[in-house]
Image (spheres, rainbow, N blue to C red):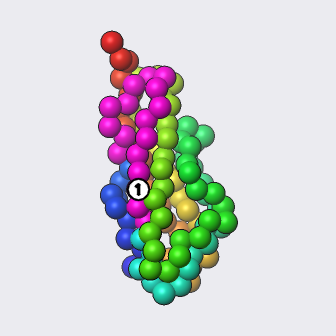
């Protein structure tokens, strides 16, 4: 596989309703070919990412993706992020994001 993802799942710890939670994921391009992000698809508009279309994951380098969420209500969060790439060996990377929002006392 040309990409190593650490951690494999995006986990939001200690999420509180109305407060921003963040999580970092590292994507390492272990191939000898740069990969451009052609499109970013998310399962909802709840997540905010620090990356954009046109960003490049360079060969042999890592990119840190910071994902932010502000839960509107208590309960479980389960989201999907799909990065569409121009890499010949892997057309997309799919990430799952999880968390549980509670009301802070």
Q: Main SS of the magenta segment?
A: strand
**Which residue lies under the disc numbered 1?**
25
Between 43 and 56, which is closer to the camera in this rendering? 56
Q: Residue at x 53, y 84 (%)?
A: 33
Q: Residue 1: x percent and y percent?
A: 39, 79
Q: Is residue 17 above or below residue 78?
A: above
Q: Residue at x 66, y 61 (%)?
A: 53
Q: Indicate yes or no whether the magenta region holds residue 25.
A: yes
Q: Is residue 58 above or below residue 39?
A: below
Q: Residue 94: x percent and y percent?
A: 47, 61
Is residue 89 at least partly visible in the picture?
no
Is residue 34 at least partly visible in the picture?
yes
Outermost residue toward the bottom in this view: 32
Q: Secondary structure at mark 1?
A: strand
Between 70 and 77, which is closer to the camera in this rendering? 70
Q: Is residue 66 left or right of residue 56?
A: left
Report the quarter where the C terminus lies.
top left
Find residue 84 and report its image quarter. bottom right
Q: Is residue 86 left or right of residue 73?
A: right
Find residue 38 and report its image quarter. bottom right
Between 36 and 85, which is closer to the camera in this rendering? 36
Q: Residue 12: x percent and y percent?
A: 37, 40
Q: Residue at x 37, y 71 (%)?
A: 4
Q: Residue at x 53, y 71 (%)?
A: 57
Residue stretch in magenta: 11-27
């Amino acid at each position: 596989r040309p990409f190593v993802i650490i951690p494999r799942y995006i986990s939001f710890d200690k999420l509180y309703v109305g407060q921003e939670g963040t999580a970092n994921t590292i994507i390492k391009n272990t191939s000898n070919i740069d990969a451009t992000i052609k499109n970013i698809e998310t399962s909802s508009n709840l997540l905010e990412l620090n990356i954009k279309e046109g960003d490049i994951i360079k060969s042999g380098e890592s990119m840190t993706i910071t994902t932010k969420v502000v839960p509107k209500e208590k309960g479980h969060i389960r989201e999907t992020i799909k990065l569409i790439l121009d890499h010949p060996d892997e057309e997309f990377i799919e990430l799952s994001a999880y968390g549980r929002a509670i009301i802070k006392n």
